[in-house]
Image: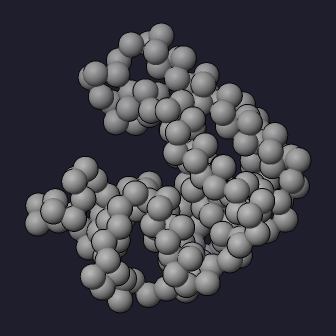
Amino acid sequence: MLKIIGKATSINVRKVLWTCVELGLPFEREEWAEQHAALNPNRMVPVLVDADFVLWESNAICRYLCNRDGGQALLPLDARERALVEQWMDWQATELNNAWRYAFMALVRHSPAHGDPALVAASVDGWNRHMGLLDAQLGTTGAWVTGSGFTLADVVLGLSANRWLMTPMNRPDYPHLTSWLERLGQREGFRLHGRNGIP
């Protein structure tokens, strides 16, 4: 059985847990402990253990699970369709994450190192602007992030949208994003892991 190491509240661990639900894969989740440090030189979660194979980095794990278990609906075989899914996954991991980091650390984690009001405001503005890009994309596709079918792009960005909604800050009204979140709420994986188990 697959073993997923990391706390269930971690946004990156939840990517993997949700992907497993979508693929119907049984798994065990184990809390991070000091003995796991040898599995990931970055000492971060999640870590996937599949028999004698160890993998870290959440997006890489999600891709691996789709490739391993016939998840072509989540990660298409067609080169162009797959590239679009991976484009939005990479955008989430780089551009979007960098936009929200300062605001999240200040407003949710209450980090003393992130207390500059101007930097918080700039981060909130950048975060909202990036979510506006996602809203525009959803307005174009009319359904899911890359088109008419649900993919891994929806998993990783669904978790990001949940974090955006749960952070105490001012947000624009993004109607396409709101409709998309309602569609996500109909999926078992999102109900279990996308909203931290909140129905």
- Up the image or down, 57 lies above or below 24; here it is above
Is 13 positioned to the left or the right of 51 in the image? Answer: right
- The extreme top residue here reads 118
How many numbered discs, if any?
0
Q: Quadrant of the C terminus?
A: bottom right
Its colouring scheme is one colour
Question: Would you identify the image quadrant in which residue 111 lies?
Answer: top left
Residue at the outermost left position: 35
Q: Residue at x 52, y 23 (%)?
A: 123
Question: Which residue occupies the extreme front position in the image?
Answer: 79
Residue 11, visible in the rendered structure: yes
From the viewer's perspective, tell me whether residue 57 is left or right of residue 195.
Answer: left
Towards the viewer: 196 or 31: 31
Judge by depth and name the residue closer to the eye, 164 or 94: 94
Residue 183 placement: quadrant: bottom right
> Where residue 174 appears, x then y in whole percent?
77, 39
What residue appears at the point 70 percent right and 62 percent down from the top-left corner?
A: 82
Residue 199: in sight, yes or no?
Answer: no
Q: Quadrant of the N terminus?
A: bottom left
Residue that appears at 75% across and 47% down: 177
Front-most of 179 and 198? Answer: 179
Q: Position of residue 80 (x, y in %)?
A: 77, 59
Residue 191 horizontal/vertical position (percent) = 57, 69
Lateral position of residue 129 relative to residue 174, left or right? left
Q: Position of residue 189 (x, y in %)?
A: 57, 73
Q: Residue at x 35, y 61 (%)?
A: 56
Give the quarter of the image for residue 95. Answer: top right
